[in-house]
Image: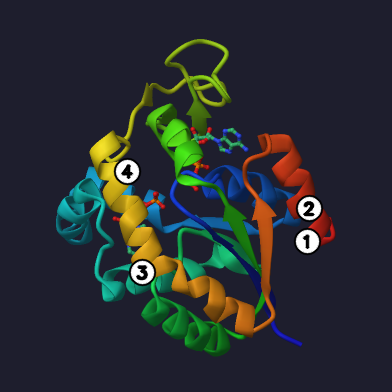
Amino acid sequence: MSRAVAYVLLGPPGSGKGTQAKLLAPKLGMAHISIGDLLREAVRNGTEVGKLAKSYIEAGKLVPDEVAMKIAEDAMKGPACEKGFVVDGFPRTIEQAKLFDALLKRIDFNLEKVLYIDLPLKEILKRLTGRRSCKKCGAVYHVVFNPPKKEGVCDVCGGELYQRKDDTDDVIKVRFDVYQKETFPLIDYFKRSGKLVKIDGSKDVKSVFSEICRIAGV
Ligand code: ADP
Ligand code: AMP
């Protein structure tokens, strides 16, 4: 028996990984880890990692594997993950997936499921151009599909909502190409381990979450 379990949310940018991870983690009593959120926090705080990551993020490219790995490993070894974690946006390359497997062994965690949320490019564009995030708590909204009660203000903490710099048409296209080239091969990689479950991401947030809960048995 392993010490705890890990869930991975895989899928193209805008497929709803963050939205679902934020719902699933508390339901399972586990920590939520988003490498994208941690990198943006590092950029805001002007740390060394943040300075390095900024240009990659703004161009829609992946940060180098060793940078993503270091952030992931620090988070996964943290006390918040004692009961397990739900990670979104990681791993994103075959190299990261291999290093992640080795890390899970070292920390004695079992990879329970890889939840692959599928969504076509046309829908991705609609989702990402309308995304708004809270500056303070990171809650995620959509101007049409999931609007806050008061425009520009976070329902959860009252913080100011902003549009991510990488959620513009041009950068979204780069991110989608990077996804297809670097991350899409992970679907076969995890299929081989028998852990991958495909989920239709085109349904509304509630329906996708019900499906995920059914798969996770909660
Ligand atoms: P990811 O983490 O995969 O990049 P997000 O969870 O940030 O994606 O979702 C992208 C955008 O789509 C956000 O604006 C979010 O509010 C919205 N969204 C997420 N899931 C759904 C859904 N099932 N239906 C409609 N909009 C959604
Ligand atoms: P996300 O918040 O998941 O949309 O990620 C935003 C950006 O952070 C990506 O476009 C990458 O530049 C960077 N990033 C997030 N996760 C990773 C990862 N696992 N590997 C490399 N770069 C990442």
Query: Mark 2 or mark 4, which is nearer to you?
Result: 4
Query: Mark 3 or mark 1, which is nearer to you?
Result: 3
**SS at mark 4?**
helix
Q: Mark 2 near ligand 1 (CB under 8 Å)? A: no
Q: Which residue is mark 3?
A: 182
Which amino acid does the dot numbered 4 rest on? Ile
Residue 204 x/y as whole percent? 68, 34
Query: Mark 2 or mark 3, which is nearer to you?
Result: 3
* Residue contact at pointers 3 and 1, CB within 8 angstroms: no
Query: Mark 4 or mark 1, which is nearer to you?
Result: 4
The answer to whether residue 23 is above or below residue 31 is above
Question: Considering only order in the chain, which callout, 4 or 2, is on the residue closer to the N terminus?
Answer: 4
Q: Which mark is residue 216?
A: 1
* Residue contact at pointers 1 and 2, CB within 8 angstroms: yes
Q: Residues within 10 Å of mark 3 (few under 14, many from 20)?
A: some
Q: Which mark is residue 172?
A: 4
Q: Mark 4 near ligand 2 (CB under 8 Å)? A: no
Which amino acid does the dot numbered 1 rest on? Ala
Question: Considering only order in the chain, which callout, 3 or 2, is on the residue closer to the N terminus?
Answer: 3
Residue 160 x/y as whole percent? 39, 21
Q: Which mark is residue 108?
A: none
